[in-house]
Image: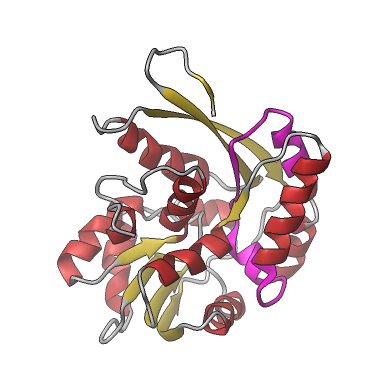
Amino acid sequence: MYPSTEPGLRSWRIGQIVPSSNTTMETEIPAMLRAREQLPQFADRFTFHSSRMRMKKVTQEELAAMDRDSDRCAAELSDGRMDVLGYACLVAIMSMGLGYHRESQKRLHEVTVANGKPAPVVSSAGALIEGLTALGAKKVAVLTPYMLPLTELVVNYIEHEGFEVMDSVSLEIPDNLQVGAQDPLAPSELVSRLNTKGVDVIVLSACVQMPSLASIQRVQDRLGIPVISAAVCTTYCMLKTLGLATVVPDAGALLTGRY
């Protein structure tokens, strides 16, 4: 935390390690935290800072090459003394092997320590697992924009962490810019393609690039099932890491402050 220019307010620097073609993470996370700023019970303000890793198409080869660039991004962001860093690519982490989010978060934190400006690190992959755990989920349904083989990697990763994926839908969009260009309200209709009977939680977007924030509360209210996304979970983990109340209006059950 660093001093705010406004008396009585606390300011926090949010660093994001972002794929170069990602246009959504820097939209949805600020939108959630800006909405939180409007709540009268909180005196927190946030600034947002990014460093980018090259990636155009969501293939396993490009994801692996991109992940190698994440250390540089962590070092660059730590130069600005971030309060928390978020690695904003779920499938890049999950495609690197089961449980890899723990290794990645530890390594990137160590990069900031070596730079003399330590910052905690969360990843969207680890955050999704933490969000499901916080909600007490056992059975989940998952919507992704990925090609089917990458969705299968994501499903295997989630199941390795102790959850049962009852159903998943792949939109099979290989171009990351096209993923980011999807209508934020589209997931509220696409969810009808998922079998949600008996599930505890719906993952409406297992991708920080696929817009879904406008659909989260809408789908949850309609179906009566907790609804999350990778971006919602990342925001939850960032707030939790900063020791702040995990409250964002109209962003689903996980951000009601009850978890």
231 left or right, relative to 60: left
Q: Nearer the viewer, residue 125 or 143?
A: 125
Which quadrant does the N terminus fall into? top right
Q: Residue at x 31, y 65 (%)?
A: 227
Which quadrant does the C terminus fall into? bottom left
> Where residue 14 sits in the image (x, y, percent)?
55, 36
Q: Is residue 24 visible?
A: no
Q: Is residue 178 above or below residue 147?
A: above
97 left or right, relative to 72: left
Q: Is residue 195 magenta?
A: no
Q: Is residue 81 magenta?
A: yes
Dividing the picture into quadrants, the one containing residue 187 is: bottom left
Q: Residue at x 54, y 69 (%)?
A: 146
Q: Find the magenta span and give its range.
A: 74-101
249 left or right, relative to 243: left
Q: Nearer the viewer, residue 148 or 132?
A: 132
Dividing the picture into quadrants, the one containing residue 252 is: bottom left
Q: Nearer the viewer, residue 40 or 233?
A: 40
Q: Residue at x 28, y 30 (%)?
A: 38
203 left or right, relative to 248: right
Q: Is residue 42 above or below residue 64?
A: above
> Where residue 10 sits in the image (x, y, percent)?
44, 25
Q: Is residue 118 visible?
A: yes
> Where residue 131 sits in the image (x, y, percent)?
43, 64
